[in-house]
Image (cartoon, rainbow, N blue to C red):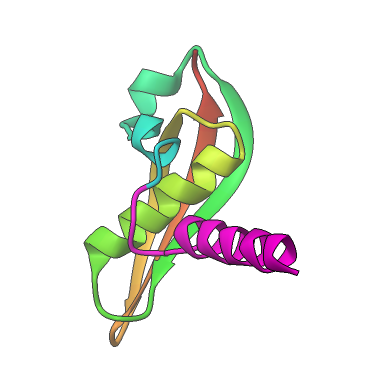
Amino acid sequence: MKNYLMICLVVIALTGCSSNPGVLTEYGKKVEIVLPAKVSNCDIIGKVIGENKDGSLEMAKIDLRNRASRMSSDSVVVKEVVQNGSHFLINALAYKCN
């Protein structure tokens, strides 16, 4: 029973750490927001969206980089930033350059 409880606590702790939307992950740190010229020789992976509903553009950028990293992207090009009240939405394209 003690082992089962310990395993549950570890799983909960790891899940909580990985789902914190305001923290740039280790993989997210490897994703750069770049200008289109920098991705001219890169492979496009697809569309990616970053968002924040608390009025922070910086937090939306963190979300964008984290989501792009989960697509195995290392670069993103922002296509559009939309603000609706305190909700920021960043539409971008994810690329693999390395």
Q: Position of residue 57 (x, y in %)?
A: 25, 64
Is 60 part of what is drawn in magenta? no
Residue 6 drawn above or below residue 92:
below
Residue 59's spot in the image, x, y percent? 29, 63
- Residue appearing at x 43%, y 37% in the figure: 76
54 relative to 49, above or below: below
Name the side, left or right, on which 44 lies relative to 50. Answer: right
Residue at the far bottom in the pictured view: 85
Q: Quadrant of residue 36?
A: top left
| Residue drawn at point x = 58 percent, y = 58 percent | 10
Rendered image quadrant of residue 82? bottom left
| 22 inside magenta stretch | yes
Look at the magenta stretch and give its main secondary structure.
helix
In magenta, the rendered stretch is 1-24
In this picture, residue 91 sits left or right of residue 38: right
Above or below residue 9? Residue 68 is above
Which quadrant of the rendered structure holds the N terminus? bottom right
Of 24 and 9, the residue lying toward us: 9
Decide if residue 33 is on the left or right side of residue 92: left
Residue shown at 46% from the left, 28% from the top: 74
Q: Nearer the viewer, residue 32 or 1?
A: 1
Q: Position of residue 46 (x, y in %)?
A: 63, 40
